[in-house]
Amino acid sequence: MPTFMSMSQTSSPRDTDTTLSWLDAGGETGALIRAYDWTPTGLGPPDRWPQSLRTATALLLLSPVPIVLLWGEKGIMIYNDAYSVFAGSRHPQLLGTEVRKGWAEVADFNDNVMRVGLAGGTLAYRDQQLTLERHGKPEPVWMNLDYSPVLDESGTPGGVIAIVVETTERVRAEQRVRESEERLRFLDELGKRTTEATDADAIMAITTRMLGEHLGVSICAYADMEPDEDAFTIRGEWKLADAVSLVGRYRLGDFGSRAVGDLSAGQALVIHDVDTELPDHEALAFRAVGVCASICMPLVKEGRLTALMGVHHATPRRWTGRDLALLNEVTQRSWAHIERVRAEATVRDGERRFREELEAKVAERTAALERSEASIRTIFETSHLYQGLMSTDGTLLYINGTALAGVEARLEDVVGLPFWRTPWFADTPGMPEAVEAAVRRVAAGGSENLGMTLNLPTGVRAFDFSLRPVVNERGEVTAMVPEAVEKTARLKAEQALMQVQKMEALGSLTGGIAHDFNNLLMAVQGSLELLRERLPPEPLLLRLLDNARAGAERGSALTARMLAFARRQELKTQRVDLRELVEGMADLLQRSLGTTIVVETRFGHPLPPVVVDANQLETALLNLAVNARDAMDGAGRLVIATDEAWLPDASAPLAPGRYVRLALMDSGNGMDDATLKRATEPFFTTKGVGKGTGLGLSMVHGLAEQSGGALRLRSVPGEGTTAEIWLPAAEGPADALSPSTSTATKKPSPPADRAYTVLSVDDDDLVRATTVEMLEDLGYTVFSSPSGDDALRVLERTAVDLVITDHAMPRMTGAQLATQIRSRWPSVPVVMATGYAELPAGMQLDLPRLAKPYSQASLAEVVRRTLGITT
């Protein structure tokens, strides 16, 4: 293993301040790098490192942020002082080690990092949780991680640089805040519910049910202790349907010495698993009543154990400090509330001697309330919530500035009005009546929680609204507190995020399926094409073969639509005048739609051209027209219109700018909201079985987005549907549209001038074998390789005239193979065979493309064109 050497051991004539000066600013870690024996790692002394490695190391040493460089295929670790602090007791042993060995507990995670980074990709994680051993034991750690490739002298990734920012404290703080908020919400709701109860049994019934459901336990029960502090009676409980009832009389001693000792001392009895924590005879008492885990909270009054409250579970459970704290607070609150209710009952029963004392307390609290009014008003005014105060008849007494800003009103404009007639509700149909009814219910002692969307002068806003009573010590409602928190932005963000994530996931899945299906179709179509040339002229055999070829071609069309939805189709863009394109399709559209569909065109003033694949746009327009025909049941009016639009602000997924719209409006049945939301999903269709693939709108959606625009749909049931293709406007005149040419169907003739050698590279055995057969049938000498590494070995020993390679291959992609070939054999041309439209970010290669699945004619044409063979 590499070691740290003294400066005298590492010094040499080359090791001068000038040679290693880039290490001088690296602090302690820079000195360690200088003193480290790097020979066993394969990197050699730092003064002989390649410039790319030295530059990256110098940059990270200067950074105050934790950065680690993972160099080479094994990810040799080089890092700075900040990272050494993050590494804890593992520093300095981590320096110079392979990353999967240095952090063995997360080896799989780092294997993926190296695989993606050395392939030229980047990774970013936010609040990523990993379990690391930094101080001698495993600990959960949260981090923001950013990984980027570092290019070596050849321009290919030689390593991966990682920026590591630990967020553990923030994440844990946020968790604590969320847990605290959840606890406070529960306690607030419990307080509201128990406030409505008028006797002890009702209070405990509400408390045990809510606490049991909140903690997810089998049983929540309460008991009264007898004077001997041993016998107790469980008087009430809440339990799951299949749990054993605990109601009855028991002796504390039957449950063991631990129960007696802890509870008698006023301490909670906490047992996670009776079988592992208690002797068998004590555990038996718990198991007899169906309890395997328990927290029992004692209530000690004047030094005497008077009551118990507990939560129990039928299976072992690891109780948390939060569980214990919540049970303790609920117990104290419940008994305090019970005492209050009992005291009120005592007052109602005629013990009038406490009246003066109680009235004095009320007066004292009233005075305290008056003294704190200014403080409460300050709190109200600094809150982000809409908060106010109203009398029991619903008259608004006060409202804070946040609420006033929402309706652009002053306090004097609204004070004294019935709450339901204020500007917050007046312009929302049905809302004044709903709020008035809620006010009446709360004035009678209830509580209200409503979700509402309001038409305010400042716009449409969504709120969570609550209305609670203010009661005195006799349970009488003296006032009401309305409170609302706005959730408009959160709801919009959540809806937008869900839709984006859903469509991104569908796009990735669809594109991946189409890519793999193209490989299968490649083998099928190529094999059928070669087979047809060799079959005897038997009509039945040829007809069956042609049926199979037609099916494969339909599959190719299906995958093309799937790739269009996934935005991975190959686009041949040009400047297009939409009016010229639509007019050129007029006859085709009319023939496709039939004479019972009236096609009307409405062209706006002269529009700028758009940059788009004209053939794909024609297909998209035809798809939309056929969909409209089906929606109109074959009879109706279809309007095709163009106009120009300007977006001043971002309107997802469109950026601000100038756009040209191509709209199709039909008079069909239209779609409801649920259907409209799913209309662009792949394979979703409302047509009958066999009448549609569900990819038409998906293809149009993908083409529009891949061209920098969007597809927008509007529909009203019974009135029709409007489909708009938005495309960015382009400068300059449109290109002339030329009719597409069909591929010749007769077999291409072999090259005549000399013998050519072709290397076919594809990790799919079927595709590779089919390509070899088609090339040999064309008269070429063919070698084949299943991977980029094998292809390089073939090129080292064999002269070839052309390489045809797949792109999506493991370990070395086709783009990476092409880069290596250009570097080592610049005279050998490369053709990229792939079903994807784009190469990965950072790969700027101008290569001839061959779209999968390809025919023998297409293959022959691209080979001849690339090699410059003339017939």
Image: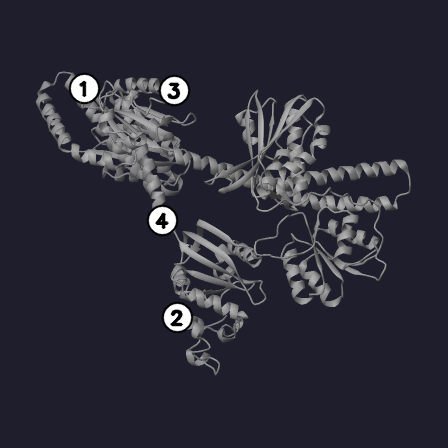
Q: Nearer the viewer, mark 4 or mark 3?
A: 3
Q: Position of residue 75 (x, y in %)?
A: 52, 62
Badge 4 local density, few (<14 within 10 Å), some, or many (20+)?
few
- The residue to which callout 1 is attached is 345
- The residue to which callout 4 is attached is 170
Label 1 – label 4 distance at C-alpha: 49 Å
Q: Which mark is residue 429?
A: 3
Label 4 – label 3 distance at C-alpha: 44 Å
Whichever of labels 1 and 4 marks the residue nearer the N terminus, that label is 4
Q: Position of residue 497 (x, y in %)?
A: 47, 39
Q: Position of residue 775 (x, y in %)?
A: 80, 54
Q: Amino acid at mark 2?
A: Ala
Q: Which mark is residue 25?
A: 2
Q: Amino acid at mark 3?
A: Pro
Between residue 245 and residue 557, name the one nearer to us. 557
* Helix, strand or loop at mark 4: helix
Label 4 – label 2 distance at C-alpha: 31 Å
